[in-house]
């Protein structure tokens, strides 16, 4: 068919109307239909009102029906491409396509084994058009399961060997993988969708592996965008990515790009994208900031900042990341001050671009003041602690000397004490032996002192009929009194007192 438009007709609506009639008349000729659809796309891209009119006369419905017919992949690709173009050009078309049914239809194109690689790529591109800056599309992507299909494509499309090489397989699969990255990025950001962020968290280990496997810009660029959007504003995901070594991988790639930045401006611009991803990973994440301090990232950012080839927007990204580096890590602030960072920041921007500088420089100055005060407080605390330590050491030394002297005296006493104790014990034992010997010689001496009965004989006396303790004790005392207590004679004085005179002695009869 000859669906060429009459250039003399100025009215786009007339052109669209004529083009739609031509397509309807030649539906059986797939080549003519594809040609007509491509012509229509070129009109709509330059005139949004044309796409609105196309939707109002039933053109959008017709193209959607064509996509669902059992037609070759080439025609399906063109129909889906047309629908995506309409969604981008016209808000009414965009709203009409944001339905669960249509998302399900697109998902079937992606998962169908008969679908060509190009058809899958265009299908994902259509989803990107419906999801970008559209919270309704973000929700539908999750609710219809399309986001799960995209996550699987991200993990499985490119193998490690394909990433390492630039073979034909990589070139064929890369467009699909690239558009998948962009669609997942749109699914979690602008506006931010926390639920989709959490769902996409499980692709971060794969992203880290790919970063470590290749320094290709075509791999680093989409990955940095995707990682940055997934972790942005979500401390839990930031910490998870940090824990699996993702931030280390970003820092390594960043340092390598900075090394190439002086000879290769594209490496410098790519390093800025990596900087943005790192900034999102460390925002309100102190462990992440300390990792960047370990890699000396702040001096590397300052190296980029002085490059004249970077735009104002790119330098602004660098400044934002610098601020986040110092926000939760004083070590990064120290690196900035050691490398004359304040002056480099002020010199890197022209007078007309000092708006961002007027924000970041005072922030750094305040942080520096707080940091210095903290250092002084720690220093004074250290000095005070040292003084206390010295006093304690002097006291311990004095105490040790005193204890040593006392210990010496105690040791001298202990050396003498065994003889004394031994003498006392010998004396006690000796007295005890003498007492036993005396009692053995004079048993009546021991009887002068009453002791409780300790034998069965005396007990039988107490328990015998008619006897009691008093009579038994008195009888024993009488027996003792009949004997002399001492064998040796008493002193004379005592004899005179105790013995009667001769006159008083009774005479023998």
Image (cartoon, rainbow, N blue to C red):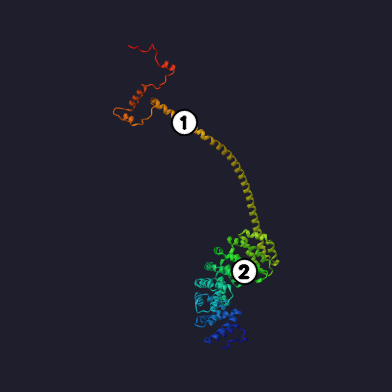
Q: Residue at x 66, y 71 (%)?
A: 265
The answer, for residue 360, to whether it is visible in the render is: yes
Identify which residue, 340 or 246, lies in the foreground: 246
Residue at 65%, 71% in the rendered image: 266
Tell me where residue 154 appears, x and y as whole percent: 54, 72
Residue identifier under label 1: 428
Q: Is residue 249 above or below residue 469?
A: below
Frontmost residue, 446 versus 384: 446
Question: Which residue is situated farthest in the bottom direction here?
Answer: 1
Q: Where residue 117 appears, x then y in whole percent?
A: 54, 78
User: Would you name the residue on which mark 2 appears?
Assistant: 273
Distance between the Cα atoms at labels 1 and 2? 100 Å
Query: Across the whole image, how many numbered discs are drawn on residues?
Result: 2
**Tag 2, which secondary structure?**
helix
Depth check, front residue: 474 or 306: 474
Location of the N terminus (image quadrant): bottom right
For residue 458, side relative to residue 72 (left or right): left
- Occupied quadrant, residue 95: bottom right
Can residue 56 be seen in the rendering of this structure? no
Task: Reply above or below: 479 against 158.
Answer: above
Q: Residues within 10 Å of mark 2 (few under 14, many from 20)?
A: many
Disc 1 residue crowd, few under 14, some 14–19, many 20+, Cα 10 Å = few
Q: Nearer the viewer, residue 363 or 123?
A: 123
Residue lying furthest left: 465
Q: Residue at x 59, y 43 (%)?
A: 396
Residue 501 percent coordinates (x, y): 40, 13
């Amino acid at each position: 068919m000859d669906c060429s438009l009459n250039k003399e007709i100025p009215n786009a609506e007339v052109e669209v109307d004529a083009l739609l009639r031509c397509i309807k008349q030649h539906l059986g000729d797939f080549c003519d239909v594809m040609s007509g659809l491509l012509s229509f796309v070129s009109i709509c891209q330059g005139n949004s009102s044309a796409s609105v009119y196309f939707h109002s006369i039933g053109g959008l419905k017709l193209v959607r029906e064509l996509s669902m017919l059992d037609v070759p992949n080439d025609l399906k690709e063109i129909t889906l491409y047309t629908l995506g173009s309409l969604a981008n050009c016209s808000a009414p078309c965009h709203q009409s396509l944001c339905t669960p049914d249509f998302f399900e239809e697109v998902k079937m194109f992606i998962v169908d084994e008969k679908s060509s690689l190009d058809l899958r790529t265009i299908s994902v591109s259509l989803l990107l058009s419906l999801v970008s800056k559209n919270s309704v599309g973000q929700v539908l992507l999750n609710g219809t399961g399309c986001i799960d299909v995209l996550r699987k494509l991200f993990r499985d499309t490119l193998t490690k060997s394909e990433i390492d090489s630039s073979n034909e397989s990589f070139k064929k699969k890369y467009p699909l993988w690239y558009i998948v990255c962009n669609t997942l990025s749109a699914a979690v950001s602008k506006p931010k969708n926390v639920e989709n962020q959490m769902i996409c968290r499980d692709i971060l280990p794969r992203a880290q592996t790919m970063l470590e496997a290749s320094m290709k810009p075509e791999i680093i660029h989409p990955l940095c965008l995707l990682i940055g959007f997934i972790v942005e504003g979500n401390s839990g995901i930031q910490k998870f990515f940090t824990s699996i070594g993702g931030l280390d991988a970003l820092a390594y790639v960043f340092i390598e790009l900075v090394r190439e930045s002086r000879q290769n401006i594209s490496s410098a611009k790519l390093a800025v994208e990596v900087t943005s991803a790192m900034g999102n990973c460390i925002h309100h994440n102190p462990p992440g900031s300390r990792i960047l301090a370990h890699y000396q990232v702040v001096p590397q950012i300052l190296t980029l900042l002085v490059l004249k080839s970077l735009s104002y927007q790119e330098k602004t990204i660098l400044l934002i990341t610098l601020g986040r580096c110092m926000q939760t890590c004083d070590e990064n602030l120290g690196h900035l001050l050691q490398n004359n960072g304040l002056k480099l920041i002020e010199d890197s921007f022209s007078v007309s671009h000092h708006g961002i500088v007027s924000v970041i420089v005072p922030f750094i100055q305040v942080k520096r003041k707080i940091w210095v005060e903290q250092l002084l407080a720690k220093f004074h605390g250290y000095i005070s602690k040292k003084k206390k330590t010295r006093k304690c050491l002097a006291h311990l030394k004095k105490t040790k000397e005193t204890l040593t002297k006392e210990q010496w005296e105690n040791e001298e006493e202990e050396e003498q004490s065994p003889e004394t104790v031994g003498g006392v014990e010998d004396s006690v034992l000796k007295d005890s032996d003498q007492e036993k010997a005396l009692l053995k010689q004079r048993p009546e001496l021991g009887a002068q002192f009453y002791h409780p009965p300790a034998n069965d004989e005396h007990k039988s006396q107490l328990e015998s009929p008619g006897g009691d303790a008093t009579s038994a004790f008195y009888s024993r005392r009488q027996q003792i009194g009949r004997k002399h207590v001492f064998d040796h004679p008493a002193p004379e004085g005592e004899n005179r007192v105790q013995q009667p005179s001769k006159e008083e002695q009774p005479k023998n009869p």
